[in-house]
Amino acid sequence: MEIEVTAESISEKKGLPAGIWTKCKKCEHILLQRDFEENFMVCPKCEYYTRLSPSQRIAFTVDEGSFKEINANLRSVNFLNFPEYTEKIGMAGLSDAIVTGEAKINGYNVVIAIMNFSFMGGSMGAVVGERIVRAVERALKKKWHVIIISSSGGARMQEGILSLMQMGKTSAALVKLADNGLAYISVLTDPTTGGVAASYAMLGDINIAEPKSLIGFAGPRVIEQTIRQQLPEGFQLSEFLEKHGMVDIVVERKDMKEVLTRFLKFFSNK
């Protein structure tokens, strides 16, 4: 008889409160939650990068207590009366697939946007597009640089053409940053795909990727079925994209804040 070992069963056996232990989603290695968080939610055994919530990403990336959310009142609307869409939005328990705000990174003021894959696969709808545009407008007003951390399955099918329009809308807004001498730093995490990858996620003055992140428009399986050829090993992973000039640099999560600081320093001194 095979007995499954879980973080909960270990806590129960040792008489410890729940939440003390956790298990890697890839290799199932059991480790202390505290150690896991201190390692930036990266498994020390297999180096699997656990997907982060916006609050976790904020804690790892910006100066403590500096983040102030903006445009939180915007909510998705079922424009097309798509079946069950209204209920799905409510069940998510979150405001939408992106959080935007003002923050400091080692003292440098930025406007930052962080996508949330837990909200309908981080899909881009009208609210995501509008929050990004308003974040850019805030940056233009304050003359601050912009950072967007992407994690998305692409455009939100429940909003149809209105979702696809956000690709052009967000891209046009970002052009204004360059016109005003402000930088846009794009951070691509696992996964960044579809209409998000085909628009603002790949338009950074600097495109940074986390290790082993899936980045591309269509998935590898769809591409192989279309072209009827086997793809190279590691195709669409961040290291492959860096090698072929699609991203500028692959940065480990533990080093992300310091690397962002160096780029902010560079752009601020131009």
Image (cartoon, grey):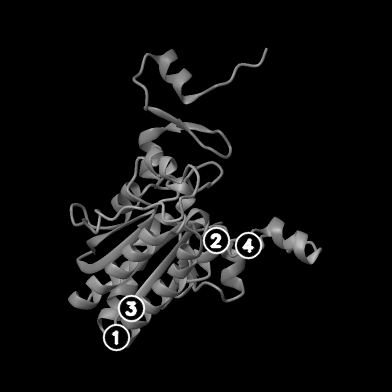
Give residue 183's mark. 3
Q: Earlier in the sequence, mark 3 or mark 2?
A: 3
The residue type indicated by label 1 comes to Gly
Residue 262 position within the rendered picture, expressed as x and y whole percent measured from the top left: 32, 72
Q: Are marks 2 and 4 in contact (CB under 8 Å)?
A: yes
Q: Give the distance between the C-alpha atoms of the residues marked 3 and 2, in whole angstroms.
A: 23 Å
The residue type indicated by label 2 comes to Thr
| Residue at x 42%, y 40% (from the top left corner) | 87
**Residue, far front:** 81
For disc 2, the neighbor class at 10 Å (few under 14, some 14 to 19, many from 20) is: many
Please determine whether, in this image, residue 27 is positioned above or below residue 124: above
Give residue 218's mark. 4
Q: Nearer the viewer, mark 3 or mark 2?
A: 2
Badge 2 element: strand
Q: Are marks 2 and 1 in contact (CB under 8 Å)?
A: no
Q: Nearer the viewer, mark 3 or mark 4?
A: 4
Give residue 193's mark. 2
Q: Earlier in the sequence, mark 2 or mark 1?
A: 1
Q: Which residue is mark 1?
A: 181
Badge 4 element: loop
For disc 1, the neighbor class at 10 Å (few under 14, some 14 to 19, many from 20) is: some
Q: Give the distance between the C-alpha atoms of the residues marked 2 and 1, in whole angstroms.
A: 28 Å
Residue 35 position within the rendered picture, expressed as x and y whole percent measured from the top left: 38, 38
Q: Give the distance between the C-alpha atoms of the residues marked 2 and 4, in whole angstroms.
A: 7 Å
The residue type indicated by label 4 comes to Ala
Q: Earlier in the sequence, mark 2 or mark 4?
A: 2
Q: Give the distance between the C-alpha atoms of the residues marked 3 and 1, in whole angstroms.
A: 7 Å
Q: Nearer the viewer, residue 241 or 45?
A: 241
Q: Nearer the viewer, mark 1 or mark 4?
A: 4
For disc 4, the neighbor class at 10 Å (few under 14, some 14 to 19, many from 20) is: some
